[in-house]
Amino acid sequence: MIKPDDSVEELIEKYPGINGFLLERGIVCVKCGEPFWGKLEDLIKNKGMDVDALIRELNVKFDGKQE
C-alpha cells in the first residue's frame, strides 16, 4: 500500500510507471536522473494538490487497493 510518508526513491523502484503517472500530473520525481530524496506527501503538497485523493488514485492504479 502506498502511503504519504513513503520515500519517492522506494516508490520508483517498487512501482514501474509511477514516475510517469506523477509526471502527467505535474509532479516531478526525478531530475537529472536522481530521484527526489523525500516523501511523496511533500511532493504532492508542494504542487498544492490533495494528498489523500492522489494517494487513493495511486493505490488503485499501482497497488490494486481501494479505500
Image (cartoon, helix red, strand yellow):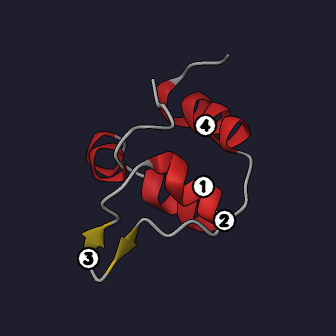
Task: Please name the residue shown 37% across and 51% down the image.
Answer: 8
Q: Amino acid at mark 4?
A: Ile
Mark 1 touches mark 2? (CB < 8 Å) = yes
Q: Quadrant of residue 38?
A: bottom left
Task: Write down the residue under mark 2.
Answer: 47
Q: Which residue is mark 3?
A: 33
Amino acid type shown at disc 3: Gly
Residue under label 1: 44
In the image, taking residue 57 as reference, residue 30 lies left or right, namely: left
Q: Which mark sits nearer the N-terminus, 3 or 4?
A: 3
Q: Earlier in the sequence, mark 3 or mark 1?
A: 3
Q: CA distance from mark 3 to mark 1?
A: 20 Å
Q: Residues within 10 Å of mark 1 (few under 14, many from 20)?
A: many
Counting residues from the start of the chain, the first of labels 3 and 2 encountered is: 3
- Seen in the picture, residue 34 relative to 15 is either above or below; the reply is below
Give the crowd class for mark 2: few <14, some 14-19, many >=20 residues within 10 Å.
few
Residue density around tag 3, few if under 14, some if 14–19, many if 20 or more, within 10 Å: few
In three-dimensional space, the C-alpha distance between marks 3 and 2, rounded to whole angstroms, equals: 21 Å
Secondary structure beneath dot 2 equals: loop
Q: Label 4, secondary structure: give it.
A: helix
Mark 2: amino acid: Lys
Cα distance between the residues tagged 1 and 4: 9 Å
Q: Nearer the viewer, mark 3 or mark 1?
A: 1
Kind of element beneath mark 3:
loop
